[in-house]
Image (tube, rainbow, N blue to C red):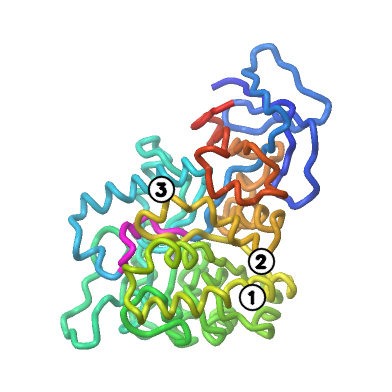
Amino acid sequence: MGYVIFKNATLIDGNGGDPRYNVSVLVENNIIREVSECGISLQSADVIDCKGNTLMPGLVDGHMHLGLIEIEVVDIVRRNPIGLIAARMFRNMRELLEQGYTSARDTGGADAGFRLAMENGEAVGPRLRVSGPCIAQSGGHGDNRGPSEYRPYYEGNMGFRSRLADGVPEVLKACRETLREGADFIKIMACGGCASPTGGPNACQYTFDEMKAAVDVADNAGTYVAAHCYSDKSISRCTEAGILTIEHGNLLERPTAKLMAQKGTYLVPTQITYEMVLEHAKDSLSKFMYDKFIAVNDRGYEAIKIAMEEGVKIGGGSDLTGRNTKYASGAIAYQAKAQGAMNAIVSFTRVNAEIMGMSEQIGTIEEGKLADIILVNDDPLKNIDLFKNPKDNILVIMQDGKLYKKMI
Ligand SMILES: [Zn+2]
């Protein structure tokens, strides 16, 4: 690989400080070796003249599901052959990288094989952290049975899937099995969801003891629990139980935000998923589901503002379904509506890297970090919407020192 120098760049390094101008960045193999405002020259290096365009860390998606291959998510594992689901999941991986996501966290569905395939160079996509199947309660978000079905739950082997566990012993076992299979962290469903056939975002799922059981298993293994939550009650219960990341969190209220800030709990909003379903796919939803999407969307922006004001650490995710995956890089633009552009950039770089457990390696452009770098063709602080069109607006994508895209 050798040396690459990015010169004449405006640098947004992911730490949230003001942009720096006329910066050069030296990459040696897959490592960022030097960041300098005095210019860098090295005979043997390939030079990329950034022409004043903005250099940023590769984007990190804090919440996505490779296995959400269809908008109607409930029966994906029963409707499709395993090989087809896998093929579409690998396509989703490639699409995420094409949109500038050099790393991503799969919060339910993908097994360790996807992470390994990327690490071994057998698949193209973001570096991954995966939870394997979500852990869900009977009748909870993730249980795909309708109210008049008495068949046993079928977990499936591939795609967006959940593992049902009720009571402390079953939760302990399900979490241990999931980690045995190679998951990097545990995801539980602690609340109803928008895309499930029964229940809704106001519900609360799992008891405190069940949540704590999941946290203990994860903690023993040196990892953590992420929880799907909408209702304020489920968020506060999860926070008390020691869960590290609250996914969605749309109905968050101020006292709970204070508690999250105190405990160091992360909020991972996913605003783009509601926006995209409402914009592109509302005809595919039942009225029951449509109403749930409308209800949580507006409230989600307010939750982000409350979290910011209370000092909660905020990541962010795309959480898109089906063909909407092609809009994933726009997530940062929707989140900026509540946070402002710079905060949204920090969420989708440095903070999501922390959530991935990779803050030492990725998330900022600093000496010693892995060379995950993108170059965009406009000032993202003035035009954060540029991320809605990554094909034209992301000029360079470098992942682990390798140039995946170069249009300059
Ligand atoms: Zn999700």
Q: Position of residue 292 (x, y in %)?
A: 43, 79
**Is disc 2 in contact with disc 1, using a CB cutoff of under 8 Å?**
yes
Q: Is mark 3 within 8 Å of ligand 1?
A: no
State the image coordinates of residue 367 (x, y, percent, origin top left).
71, 36
Q: CA distance from mark 3 to mark 1?
A: 34 Å
Q: Is residue 11 above or below residue 338?
A: above
Dot 3 corresponds to which residue? Answer: 115
Q: Residue at x 83, y 26 (%)?
A: 38
Q: Which residue is mark 2?
A: 338
Image-based side of 202 in relation to 35, left or right: left
Q: Earlier in the sequence, mark 2 or mark 1?
A: 1
Q: Which residue is found at the position 67% from the left and 54% from the top?
A: 346
Spatial CA span between label 2 and label 3? 32 Å
* Distance of label 2 from label 1 (alpha carbons): 7 Å
Farthest top residue in view: 43
State the residue in front, 107 or 347.
Answer: 347
Residue 335 image point, x, y percent:
61, 62
| Mark 2 element type | helix
What residue type is disc 2 on?
Ala
- The range drawn in magenta is 64-73
